[in-house]
Image (cartoon, grey):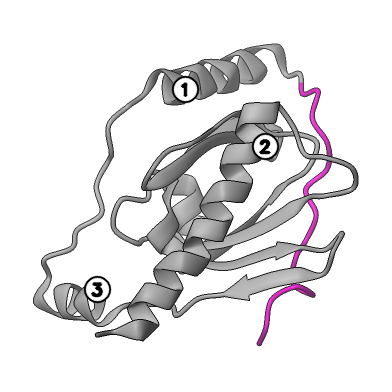
Amino acid sequence: MRYDVMAREALRGVVKKALKRIAREGGLPGEHHFYVTFQTQAPGVDIDPELVASYPEEITIVLEHQYWELSANEDSFEVTLKFGGVPKYLCVPYAAITKFYDPSVRFALQFDADTPAADAAKKSGAIKRGPGPKSDRKKAAEDKAETAEHTGGDNGGDVVSLDAFRRK
């Protein structure tokens, strides 16, 4: 029956519903904010190659005040965040998420890093990361990055280290 798989999918549904709600309502209610950790090279992840080079296994992103164009789809979510003052488009399948945390209510979920099917595909070489489809949001993020590069401007916040959040 694979109850473990059913439970994992149901709990990832909690993440999906939370992201759909903030996308629909245009922001997070009250003091809520999310830390989302995901595998950078999981199948379907579409992020800037520089981020993959800097974070070859996992990255934790924060959805609080400065995120743009969030959309929560059936199998993934898309968002634009600034890294080093430069906007970057991210498309993350829910299956790539390994941790979800809302510190305002001390709610956390942790998922298995890999499924047996993903392990087998990795071993066989069937999974190769490549560029995903370029959406209008990704193009807009690239345009913003180019504008910031030419103007030298940045109206974003600071990058915060999340090492204390990660388990060693």
Q: Relative to residue 125, is residue 60 depicted above or below?
A: above
Q: Quadrant of residue 26?
A: top right
Front: mark 2 or 3: 2
Q: Give, as a single range, the part of the protein colored magenta.
A: 154-168
The local secondary structure at tag 3 comes to helix
To which residue does mark 3 refer? 118
Q: Which residue is mark 1?
A: 137
Q: Earlier in the sequence, mark 1 or mark 3?
A: 3
Q: Nearer the viewer, residue 110 or 79?
A: 110
Please state if 76 lies on the left or on the right of 17 as rendered. Answer: left
Which residue was labeled with disc 2? Answer: 22
As for residue 162 lying within the magenta part, the answer is yes
> In the image, residue 1 lies at what x, y percent?
24, 85
Does the magenta segment cover residue 155? yes
Q: Residue at x 27, y 31 (%)?
A: 133
Q: Could you say which is closer to the camera, residue 101 or residue 145? A: 101
At label 2, counting other C-alpha atoms closer than 10 Å, the crowd grade (few under 14, some 14-19, many 20 or more) is: some
> Where is residue 142 drawn, in percent x and y?
49, 22
Q: Residue at x 41, y 17 (%)?
A: 136
Residue 156, quarter of the rendered image = top right
Residue 138's place in the image compared with 100, above or below, is: above
Q: Residue at x 49, y 58 (%)?
A: 13
Q: CA distance from mark 2 to mark 3?
A: 30 Å
User: At label 1, which amino acid type do we have?
Assistant: Arg
